[in-house]
Image (tube, grey):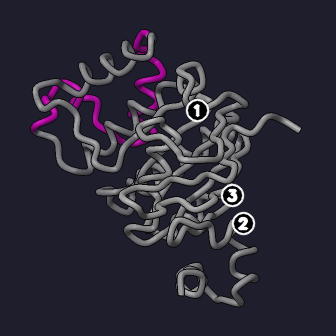
Amino acid sequence: MPEPALRLSHVVRRHSGRTVLDGVDLALAPGEILGIAGVNGAGKTTLLRCLLDFCAIDSGAIAIFGLASTLPAARRQLAYLPERFSPPAHLTGGEFLAHVAALHGRRPDGAATTAMLQALELDAGALRRTARHYSKGMTQKLGLAATLLLDKRLYVLDEPASGLDPKARALFKRAASAQRAGGAAILLTSHALADIGELCDRIAILDGGRIRFAGTPDECLRHYGAASLEQAFLDAVG
């Protein structure tokens, strides 16, 4: 069995006397996309912050390819796109891509950049404009391009389709599927259950800091006897 790209074991996080994550167990394999669904306040953001070592856990363990997530060597294997992505307004799109690559010790790859821009249908001319002139959709495409161009083994994407129109959402799914086909693991959060059902190999429903269900979308439908993931989700969270 290959080493899981990500494993959360009995993770507990408390804040201000409240248990935000309550014994979370999850595993993500290389070449797999796992979607986390949950209402606002369910613990999704806290879970991501913990695995990125932005905040400490009270008990349990988080491992990235077998290494404790608190180790810089573990986190060097992942790329993260936050939900509220906003590049520096004074940088052009091209400058931002080069800056992100440099932060990760990489040189911009012109051929890979061109291919990614084409995959997401982000106009190459946009790279010459400053980010302050970008629409929400263009900004999100830039963030996705910058993240996926890092060629990491693990991607953590928080609401990656936010602000994308239907065509751009379809293009993102195609780009994410290409990363999966190349062996990368992707952990994403989304309020769009239809997107999770179409793109993700497995879904995890988080509610009240606990995993209420984890399995394939089809298993989720059968488990709750539901005709749609939306209905299954409602049954899971009560």
- Asked if residue 109 is among those painted magenta in the image, a careful observer would answer yes
- Asked if residue 75 is among those painted magenta in the image, a careful observer would answer no
Sequence-earlier tag: 1 or 2: 1
Sequence-earlier tag: 2 or 3: 3
Per the image, the residue denoted by label 2 is 216
Q: Is residue 75 placed above or below 191 in the rendered structure?
A: above
Amino acid at dot 3: Asp
Q: CA distance from mark 2 to mark 3?
A: 6 Å
Q: CA distance from mark 3 to mark 1?
A: 23 Å
Q: CA distance from mark 1 to mark 2?
A: 26 Å
Give left or right: position of 200 versus 117. right
* Disc marking residue 69: 1
Tell me residue 228's x, y (percent).
60, 84
Give left or right: position of 190 versus 16. right
Tell me residue 19's x, y (percent).
48, 63
Per the image, the residue denoted by label 3 is 201
Q: Is residue 27 placed above or below 104 in the rendered structure?
A: below
Quarter of the image that includes the N terminus: top right
Q: Residues within 10 Å of mark 3 (few under 14, many from 20)?
A: some
Which residue is at 57% across, 58% downward?
Answer: 35
Which residue is at 59% across, 35% downward?
Answer: 154
Which residue is at 73% across, 30% downward?
Answer: 66
Image: magenta residue range: 107-132
The residue closer to the viewer here, 19 or 81, is 19
Amino acid at dot 1: Ser
